[in-house]
Image (spheres, grey):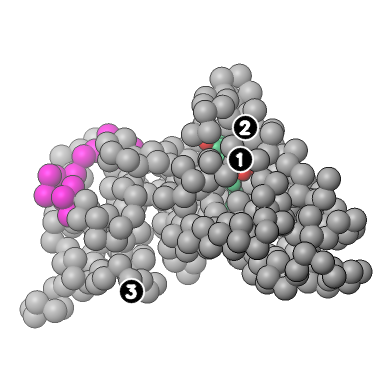
């Protein structure tokens, strides 16, 4: 067999393993631990990393190849299985080569997960709900992407004065997309059972032994921060901007780059967000109210799926109890005050 062919076959084996065997193996909690460790380690040890190319060229195949590798390691690690040192080193090299945080990230799970063959950690009915969870996030992120384009474009068009146009049709589009996102958020607590969430979300937690890893949750999405800054500009509370600076390395790369660009743009353009540039705009007031509604539903999803946050909230990276942190965000004012 040619070296070239082996190179691709080994990645193919990894894809098939992650799509087919991994969820079942994770469920069986490893009566056959040694066998699983050696099979999974061999799959990784034989990979030819040339396939991943340079970090600046990231096509769909490369993203899903990296996702499979991280998925495999993350799943096994959360079941207490450690790959061989050689396989651990291979994955460490991939992380370094692609200049990304270690462990599975929100970007991997939602942006790199191929929509025509979504990777999941579970099987059976659990997998159906897990897949819905990822699809819900994908839909929400798609809508945010369009909203952010509209808001950034409008922010660049408006100057400090002469904003007397009574209505901007594109802001109605933002309101429609936010309404859709509220429906998707409600689907999380209406459709996904807390018992199912408890099983699959364990795999999204911080990698247990990769130093510097964080979880793969929506708190690392750059989208809500982008909407916040475009509307609130320099009226965004400083502790929230500091929080973004601390979490930016864990956000999806393109989102983090855009967030930095928009912050710089707004700071250089006098600091005003759309809320201040369009005072008395009913459209902005509506968007503000929808954003509060979206965050209120997000809070309901959090308290449905992680009910302990009401009793034993834990501390966020912002250094506050989680419930307090989330409730303060719901009250953010995006319109002119
Ligand atoms: C069942 C679904 C969800 C659950 C259980 C959940 C859970 C959480 C938790 C526990 C936090 C607190 C952060 C921390 O502890 O450090 C958080 C924050 C956050 N989540 Fe989610 N989340 C869900 C869906 C989403 C979705 C779909 C998005 C949007 C893409 C999202 C975006 C955020 C953001 C931006 C924050 C930071 C706080 C804020 O700006 O309001 N989450 N989430």
- Residue of label 2: 325
Residue 324 image offset from top left, x and y in percent: 64, 28
Question: Are there few (<14), some (14-19), or many (20+) residues within 10 Å of tag 2?
Answer: some
Residue 17 image offset from top left, x and y in percent: 28, 58
Q: Is residue 329 left or right of residue 99?
A: right
Q: Secondary structure at mark 2?
A: helix
Question: Are there few (<14), some (14-19), or many (20+) residues within 10 Å of tag 1?
Answer: few
Q: Nearer the viewer, residue 158 or 13?
A: 158
**What is the magenta range?**
77-90
Q: Is residue 311 above or below residue 48?
A: above
Q: Is residue 304 above or below residue 252?
A: above
Q: Answer with mark 3 or mark 1, whichever residue precedes in sequence.
A: 3
Q: Is residue 69 located in the magenta-colored stretch of the structure?
A: no
Q: Nearer the viewer, residue 315 or 202?
A: 315
- Residue of label 1: 238
Q: Answer with mark 2 or mark 1, whichever residue precedes in sequence.
A: 1
> Residue visible at 14% across and 79% down?
4
> Residue visible at 21% across and 51% down?
92
- Report whether the residue tagged 2 is closer than 8 Å to ligand 1: yes
> Residue visible at 83% across and 60% down?
278
- Residue of label 3: 57
Q: Which residue sits furthest top? A: 311
> Residue visible at 58% across and 57% down?
263
Q: Is residue 201 left or right of residue 143?
A: left
Among the 4 quarters of the image, the one containing residue 44: bottom left
Among the 4 quarters of the image, the one containing residue 63: bottom left
Task: State the quadrant of the N terminus.
Answer: bottom left
Q: Secondary structure at mark 3?
A: loop
Question: Are there few (<14), some (14-19), or many (20+) residues within 10 Å of tag 3?
Answer: few
Q: What distance separates the C-alpha of mark 3 from that of mark 1?
A: 35 Å
Q: Secondary structure at mark 1?
A: helix
């Amino acid at each position: 067999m040619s070296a070239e062919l082996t190179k691709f076959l080994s990645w193919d084996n990894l894809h098939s393993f992650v799509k087919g065997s991994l969820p079942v193996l994770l469920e069986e909690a490893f009566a056959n631990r040694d066998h699983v460790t050696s099979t999974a380690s061999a799959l990784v040890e034989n990979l030819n990393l040339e396939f991943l190319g340079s970090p600046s060229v990231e096509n769909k195949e490369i993203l899903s190849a990296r996702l499979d590798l991280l998925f495999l390691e993350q799943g096994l690690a959360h079941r207490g299985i450690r790959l061989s040192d050689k396989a651990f080193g291979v994955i460490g090299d991939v992380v370094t080569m692609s200049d990304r945080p270690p462990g599975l990230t929100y970007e991997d799970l939602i942006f790199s997960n191929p929509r025509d063959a979504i990777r999941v950690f579970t099987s059976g009915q659990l997998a159906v709900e897990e897949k819905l969870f990822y699809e819900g996030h994908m839909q929400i992120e798609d809508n945010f992407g369009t909203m952010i384009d509209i808001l950034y474009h409008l922010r660049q068009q408006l100057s400090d004065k002469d904003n007397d146009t009574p209505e901007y049709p594109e802001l109605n589009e933002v309101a429609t997309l936010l309404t859709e996102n509220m429906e998707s958020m409600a689907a999380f607590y209406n459709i996904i059972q807390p018992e199912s969430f408890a099983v699959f979300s364990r795999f999204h937690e911080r990698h247990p032994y990769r130093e510097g890893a964080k979880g793969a949750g929506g708190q690392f999405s750059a989208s809500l921060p982008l909407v916040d800054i475009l509307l609130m500009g320099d009226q965004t509370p400083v502790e929230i901007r500091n929080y973004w600076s601390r979490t930016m390395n864990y956000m999806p790369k393109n989102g983090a780059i855009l967030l930095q660009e928009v912050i710089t743009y707004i700071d250089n353009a006098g600091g005003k967000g759309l809320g201040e540039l369009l005072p008395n705009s009913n459209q902005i007031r509506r968007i503000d109210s929808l954003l509060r509604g979206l965050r209120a539903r997000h809070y309901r999803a959090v308290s449905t799926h992680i009910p302990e946050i009401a009793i034993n909230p834990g501390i966020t990276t912002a250094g506050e109890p989680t419930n307090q942190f989330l409730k303060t965000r719901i009250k953010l004012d995006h319109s002119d005050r």
